[in-house]
Image (cartoon, rainbow, N blue to C red):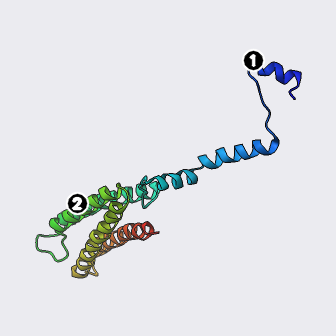
Amino acid sequence: MLSSAQASLAGPCRVIPLPQSSARQCAFRSTALRSPKRQAVRQLRRGARQTVAALESEYILAVTQQSLLFAAVTVGETYLSRQALFENSPGRPGWVTTAAGAAGVVAAVALVQSEGAVQQAGLALGTAVTGGLLYRSVKRFQNTPDDPADWPGPKVWPFTATLLTFFAVGIFGQGLANSFG
């Protein structure tokens, strides 16, 4: 039965108290049916398709920032090295490979911004492009003649480019590995 205070609060509506066990079951059902996991299962049973990103948004942001900065540094280093070296000097970087590599990195970043398999394709493209740039940097380092009288030496910029490119390969390679689980 309702107390007089409960009856006055109820007003013209009639309040029927539920037994304690029924109230608990009702509360459990309503929260269980609204949980994200439960909703996802219900959507899958209905045939709804849900696209899931292969990577977390923080990682995508990190790949984007680091890769675009790497592309800018690569173009800048090529410009400065070409200004410092004579026309037919061994180890002088070429604009064609640098521009193709920077464009490939930008294209890979654009694909990484997508979801699902396209994101993984962007990471694979980025790994392949930066791997090619790494090969170019190592060959450039090997082709640059060493001059012990010149400090820190003519191989410093090619070595720095090789080191930065190695890290760029790692950025895309780790993302690719993480995207598969």
**Pair 1/2: label in front:** 1
Check disc 1 and report its element: helix, strand or loop.
loop
Label 2 sits on residue: 103
Drawn side of residue 22 relative to residue 173, left or right: right
Q: Amino acid at mark 2?
A: Ala
Task: Judge whether 135 appears above or below 103 on screen.
Answer: below
Question: Is the residue marked by circle 2 packed among few (<14), some (14-19), or many (20+) residues within 10 Å?
Answer: some
Q: Which mark is residue 62?
A: none
- Find residue 12 and name its label: 1
Q: Quadrant of the N terminus?
A: top right
x%, y% of residue 26? 71, 43
Question: Residue 22: horizontal and vertical position, in percent?
Answer: 76, 43
Counting residues from the start of the chain, the first of labels 1 and 2 encountered is 1
Residue 60 lies, in percent from the top left, at 41, 57
Q: Which quarter of the picture shows residue 10? A: top right
Q: Secondary structure at mark 2?
A: helix
Which residue is drawn at the image coordinates 48% and 52% (left, top)? 43
- Which percent across, then down, holds residue 49? 41, 54
Say few, some or many: other residues with alpha carbon within 10 Å of mark 1 (under 14 / 14 to 19 / 20 or more): few
30 sits left or right of 46 in the view? right
Identity of the residue drawn at 39% across and 66% down = 171
State the residue in front, 75 or 32.
32
Q: Residue furthest left?
A: 88
Position of residue 28 in the picture relative to residue 59 (left or right) = right
Residue at left offset 25%, top offset 82%: 142
Residue positioned 26% across, 71% down in the render: 133
Reply above or below: 13 against 79: above
